[in-house]
Image (tube, rainbow, N blue to C red):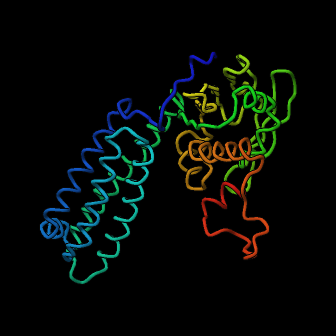
Amino acid sequence: MTHQQVLPMESVTTHTDQVPLARALGWFSVGLGLTEMTAPEILARFIGVTSRPSLVRLMGLREIVSGMGILSGRNPTDWLWTRVGGDVIDLALLGAAFKSDSANRNRVSAATAAVAGVAALDFLCTREVGRHNGKNHGIQFTRSIAVNQPREKIYQFWRNFTNLPRFMSHLQSVEMTGERTSHWTVKAPGGTTVEWDAEIIEDMPNEFISWRSREGAEVENSGIVRFEKACGGRGTIIRVDIRYRPPAGALGATVAKLFGEAPEKQVPVDLSRLKQFLETGEIATTEGQPSGRSRSTSLLYDNFVRG
């Protein structure tokens, strides 16, 4: 794999067009949401439950947001999982309504069966979209930052991969196993670690370094880091293009995001830490502050900077 094969993207994207059912569910979600928003009383009577317009409209808003998210094609698996979660909530509400003396139990039973069927479709579709995205595309993104240092200095610092854990807070260690090979250990959700071997594919001094994981890696990944002269002699633009395939496909990516471990979220913070280190020689922390707090007031700061 050469660096030209790493496709730069400004945000994580996937493709619902590969699974037509996903788009159908997106439109269904929008249509149902509009019905719940505009005619909550009629829908409640049809289902056989006591009318609660505010609750039904809230459910409608959830459906519309989920549907638009699926149809946008940006992170459709995440939006499909919100539909699955919404189905679980709907089933729980219908179960509670069934026990009510004022409910029409026949209609509630029919509505429950319908929601259960849609929930099964949502779950199967989510897995299928995840399979397509994981197998064919993975996840891709591009992040960049300007650093007020010459690119020769930045390249030399980055080219020594053992320096990377100094600013990549979720990178536990990098061990050089050869001139162009290395072993990576990365912190993962739940206090676990993920390890893999990587190799440099191309290395043009002061210009770029491209890499890929070796066969059998727990997390397949590839990418390129470019060192570009900033306009007006104002230092260097570091541009990182990454493609990776998380464990368990898109579901693994979703779970990682919930724990704050997704690379597309980590990298911008890590680049900011690198900028601090290269420009000032240190990375700001809350260690030793007079307040004596064991944590800062920012959860994001604690998660990414303190580690």
**Residue 100 appears in which quarter of the rendering?**
bottom left
Question: What residue is at 24 percent from the left and 68 percent from the top?
Answer: 56
The percent position of residue 79, horizontal first and vertical second, equals 40, 49
Q: Is residue 180 left or right of residue 209?
A: right
Residue ID at (69%, 34%): 149
Quarter placement of the N terminus:
top right
Quadrant of the image occupied by residue 233:
top right
Q: From the viewer's perspective, is residue 62 above or below residue 24?
A: below
Q: Is the residue 200 above or below the residue 242 in the image?
A: above
Rendered location of residue 126, percent (x, y): 43, 43
From this viewpoint, which residue is outermost toward the front? 232
Q: Is residue 290 above or below residue 301?
A: below
Residue located 56% across and 18% down the image: 5
Q: Position of residue 195 (x, y in %)?
A: 76, 39
Of 258 and 47, nearer the camera is: 258
Question: Extreme right residue here?
Answer: 177
Q: Quadrant of residue 249?
A: top right
Q: Quadrant of the C terminus?
A: bottom right
Nearest the camera: 100 or 139?
A: 139
The front one of 126 and 121 is: 126
In this rendering, the count of numbered labels is 0
Relative to 168, 182 lies left or right: right
Q: Nearer the viewer, residue 277 or 74?
A: 277
Residue 113 image offset from top left, x and y in percent: 30, 59
